[in-house]
Image (cartoon, grey):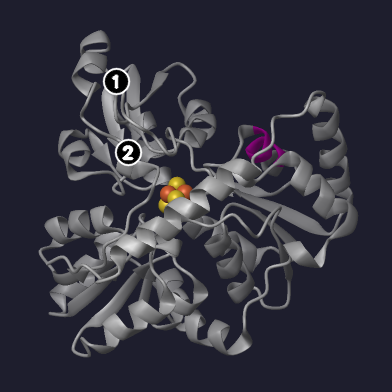
Amino acid sequence: MTTQPVDYIATRERVRAYLDRAFLGLEARPVGESVLYDSVKQKLMESDARLVAHYYVDPQIQQLAEETDGLVADSLEMARFGARTNTRRLIVAGVSFMGETAKILSPTKQVYMPTLEATCSLDVGCPENEFRAFCDSHPDREVVVYANTSAAVKARADWVVTSSIAVDLISALAMDGKKLIWAPDRYLGRYVQKQTGVDMLIWDSACVVHEEFRLHDLDALQSVYPDAGLLVHPESPEEMIDRADAVGSTTQLIDAAARLQNPSFIVATDKGIFYKMQQQVPEKLLIAAPTRGAGGTCQSCAHCPWMAMNRLSGIDRLLDTWPDSCEVLVDEKLAAQAMKPLTRMLKFKAPYAE
Ligand code: SF4
C-alpha cells in the first residue's frame, strides 16, 4: 500500500526550490586545480582529520580520500569508518544525513562537511513533524527508515537501513510477522515490498537523481551495445528495475560489474560511481543510463546536485580555518534516540550472511 501525505505537493515544491538554490551555488571548476589538489592533500595529511567520501562526489575528492588514508564508500561503510577511525576530526564529503550519522556514531569527534547546505531530496521530502504524525496514527506498525533521513526522523524509527541491507533486514522482519511503515523512498520501498511480500505502508518521496532514469532511449542504447549489462540502483523506477541484470546498492553494483561477464554496462545511478567502478573493471566500458530522453527536462542529469556541492575548495577552506558554520552538530537527546535504530542497523546481519 502507498500512502500520500495530504501536503505532499507542497513538499515537492520545497524540494524543487531547494534544488534551484543548490544549482545557483555551484561554482565552476577553478583553473589550476591540480595545484590546489596537491596543497589540500598535503594539508590533510598533516592534519588530525580523515576524509570519508561517498561514491557520488567529485572523483578528485574520492581520489583525495584514497590517497590520505580516508575512505570512499556507500553510506553504511561511511558510518562504520567514522566510528572506528581514531582521529579527532572527520571530514564527510557527502550529504547532510551522512554528516549527522557520523556525528551521532562518533559524538566525541568533531565532524565537518565542506557545506552543511548539501542535503538530499529524500530527507527534504520527509519532514519530521509530518512523519511523526503519520507513524503515530499507525501504532501497530514498526517503523523502518532509510538512512537518507534527518536525525529527527531516525529518532522516531525502530530501524534504520541502507539500500545494501534493506531487503535482508525487511525480509527478517517479515518472517517475524511484523507490519511496517517505510520511509521515505517510494521506489526502494516498492522494490523491497515486492522482494519480501511484507505488509508495509510506504511514504511517498523520491530521489531526484534516480527517479529520472527511464526506459526511454534504453532500447536504442542497448541496440548499439547489445552485450551491455544493465545495472540499476533500487531508488530507480520499477520499469528500470524490471529490466536490470543486477539491482543493488552502490557497493553491490560495483561488485556486480566485476562479477558479471558482460564487456560493458549501462549504469543507472549517479555518475560519480564511475570512478570506483572503473577501478574495479578497467577493461570494461561503462555507459550512463538514459534519463528522460530528448525534449525531457532533467533536474539532475544523473548527478546529485547536493553531492556536487562538495568541492575541493570547500575542503581547503575547512583545513585552513575549521569554520563553525561547517561543523555538524546534533542535539544530544535526538542523537541518543537516533542512536538506537542506527546501532540495530550496524549490528544487523542477514540470517544467511557469513
Ligand atoms: S543521489 Fe538522491 S538519494 Fe543520494 S543524496 Fe542525492 S538526492 Fe539523496
Q: Please name the residue shown 31% across and 29% down the image.
A: 296
Image-based side of 46 in relation to 188, left or right: right
Identify residue for label 1. 262
Q: CA distance from mark 1 to mark 2?
A: 25 Å
Under tag 2, what secondary structure?
helix
Q: Is residue 317 left or right of residue 157?
A: right
Residue neighbourhood size for the residue with mark 2, other residues' Cα within 10 Å, grouped as few (<14), some (14–19), many (≥20): many
Question: Residue 287 occupies which quadrant of the picture?
Answer: top left
Camera sees residue 194: yes
Say whether residue 87 is visible: no
Q: Earlier in the sequence, mark 1 or mark 2?
A: 2
**Residue at left offset 43%, top offset 73%:** 347
Which of the numbered marks, if any, corresponds to residue 162? none
- The answer to whether the beta carbon of the residue marked 2 is less than 8 Å from any atom of ligand 1 is no
Mark 1 residue's CB less than 8 Å from ligand 1: no
Marks 1 and 2 close (CB-CB < 8 Å):
no
Tell me where residue 314 appears, x and y as whole percent. 75, 47
Q: Which residues are magenta?
A: 60-64
Residue 271, percent from left and from top? 47, 32
**Which kind of residue does numbered mark 1 sit on?**
Asn
Q: Which mark is residue 212?
A: 2
